Amino acid sequence: MSTHYGARPTMNDVAKRAGVAPKTVSRVVNGEPGVSEATLARVRAAIAELGFRRNDGARSLRSGRTASIGLLLEDIADPFSSQLNRAVEEAARSRGCLVLAGSSAEDPVRERELALTFCSRRVDGLIVVPAGDDHRYLLPELTAGLAAVFVDRPARRIEADAVLTDNVGGAREGAAHLIRHGHRRIGFLGDLPHIPTAAERLRGYREAMTGAGLPVSPEWIVMGSTGPAEVGAAVERLTSAQVGVTAVLAGNNRITVGVLRALSAQDRGRIAVVGFDDLELADLLSPGLTVVVQDPEALGRAAAELLFGRLAGDRRPPRELRFRTRLVARGSGEIRPGTACG
């Protein structure tokens, strides 16, 4: 067999090699019916021998679609983001669609740049975990036919599909769990207060305390940076004799890690902790970490289904889907006040 360097094999080349019409090759390449098993085998053998690859660029020009979507995450390295990413990729792969992913690092400017970069690549749709509070920059793209679904947080100042977690209910359940185990002085550590999920989780904490007839001291609540130094300082203050909380509800997994690092071995047996979001190896800690669990894979699957539904012609008004959380008790949230480290 001769090799032709620099020239990509065409469908005509494959058809000639397999002894069929070019239309038959097209049917095989595009997974269309009407091709016998014997012919299918011959065409596939010719494709393999020649190294033929479908020209998706030309195909997209004909169809107006690029068979690609953009996925904009907060931090692709975060466990929540990586699980969501995997679910979206699996849904896209089953439809022959490519996923382009990027991280905003919780920066609204970076979010806008990435989203518009994806749009300039002519993706068919966007799935966005938003960092900003104004998404009107997408209006020209949406008007031109782009599909968009927002995950974890809703779009701001535009109407768009959203797939969310019941953050209020989850935080309420986490705080109520601590209350049921005898705690009355419960600290809450949350992310930046302008982030919708952080505000919702604070609200859930407050609702649990109020519902139990308990006061909420302002000094029990810390909202701000989730950096290790800031969280460590907050934990030191909350657990000091002056403030004296006996339990902590951590507003996300980064904060939970900071709390665990800041607590001494003695304090881990004395201060109860409930985290929002699970951690890898959380069950191997001593005591095991009690968490409020969301399902990022379910969020990702639902977002992808909504997006591909829009691409298939769904013209219903924007929808909001909200998923419930569940509490997983492993030990750290069941420590009672006054417990001494053994």
Image (cartoon, rainbow, N blue to C red):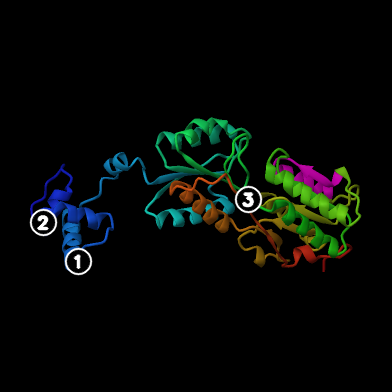
As displayed, is residue 266 above or below residue 202?
A: below
Mark 2 sits on what residue?
17
Front disc: 1 or 2: 1
Residue drawn at (17%, 61%) of the image? 45
Q: Looking at the image, can residue 169 be seen? A: yes
In-image side of 189 versus 210 (left or right): left
Q: Is residue 266 left or right of residue 21?
A: right
- Closer-to-camera residue (10/175): 10
Q: Are marks 3 and 1 in contact (CB under 8 Å)?
A: no
Q: Classify residue 288 by image quadrant.
A: bottom right
Q: Which residues are magenta?
A: 219-238
Which of the two discs, 3 and 1, sits closer to the camera?
Answer: 1
Q: How many marks?
A: 3
Amino acid under disc 3: Leu
- Kindly indicate the quadrant of the structure image that contains residue 29: bottom left
Q: Residue at x 8, y 56 (%)?
A: 1
Pick out the residue farthest to the front. 316
User: Can you give x and y, in whole percent of width and height, for residue 157 in the image?
Assistant: 62, 34
Q: Secondary structure at mark 3?
A: strand
Chain-order first, disc 2 or disc 3: 2
The amino acid type, in three-letter code, at marker 2 is: Arg
Nearer-N-terminus badge (1/2): 2
Say few, some or many: other residues with alpha carbon within 10 Å of mark 1 (under 14 / 14 to 19 / 20 or more): few
Q: Is residue 224 magenta?
A: yes
- Residue 106 lies, with reference to residue 335, above or below; the image says above
Q: Residues under labels 2 and 3: Cα distance?
A: 52 Å
Quick one: label 2, few (<14), some, or many (20+) residues within 10 Å?
some
Pointer 3 residue: 164
User: Where is mark 1, residue-wise?
Assistant: 36
Residue name at image x 87 percent, y 55 percent:
211
